[in-house]
Image (spheres, grey):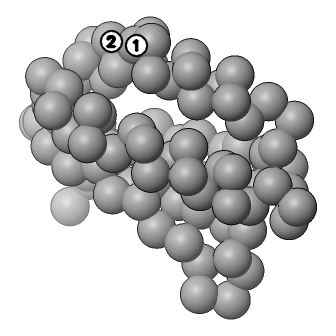
């Protein structure tokens, strides 16, 4: 059994703040991909609802993902997008097949 952790993060931006949220999300990609334990960190934008973004991430284990979650760049993202996000949903998942 693998300790690999899959994260699916769904970010619904307020329409008037979509461009700001997108810009801030894009800033996270390169710095996160360089972090220890990051297998992939892929940002998607919904084809029909441009306000909806989704990160699909895989990490070597939960501890390394937790380190990522406590990094400065995520705190900076949260500050920059305060009040600009309608909903945020995060699922921690495990491969079962």
Disc 1 crowd, CA 10 A, few/some/many (<14, 14-19, 20+): few
| Residue for point 74% across, 61% down | 18
Is residue 61 rendered to the left or right of residue 72?
left
Front in this rendered view, residue 61 or 38? 38
Q: Which quadrant of the figure contains the C terminus?
A: bottom left
Judge whether residue 3 can be spotted in this image. Answer: no
Of residue 9 and residue 91, the one placed in the foreground of this image is: 9
Residue 20 position in % (x across, y down) = 69, 51
Q: Is residue 38 left or right of residue 46?
A: left
Closer to the camera in the image, 2 or 30: 30
Q: Which residue is mark 1?
A: 71
Residue 67's label in the rendered image is: 2
Pointers 1 and 2 in contact (CB under 8 A)?
yes
Q: Quadrant of the N terminus?
A: top left
Residue at the image position 85 percent from the left and 49 percent from the top? 86
Percent x, y for residue 40? Answer: 21, 49
Report the disc number at residue 23.
none
């Amino acid at each position: 059994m693998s300790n690999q952790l899959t994260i699916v993060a769904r970010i619904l931006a307020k329409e008037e703040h979509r461009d700001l949220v997108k810009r801030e999300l894009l800033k996270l990609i390169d710095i996160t991909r360089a972090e220890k334990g990051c297998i992939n960190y892929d940002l998607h934008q919904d084809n029909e609802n441009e306000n909806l973004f989704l990160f699909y991430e895989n990490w070597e284990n939960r501890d390394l993902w937790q380190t990522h979650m406590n990094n400065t760049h995520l705190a900076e993202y949260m500050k920059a997008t305060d009040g600009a996000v309608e909903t945020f949903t995060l699922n921690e998942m495990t491969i079962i097949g």
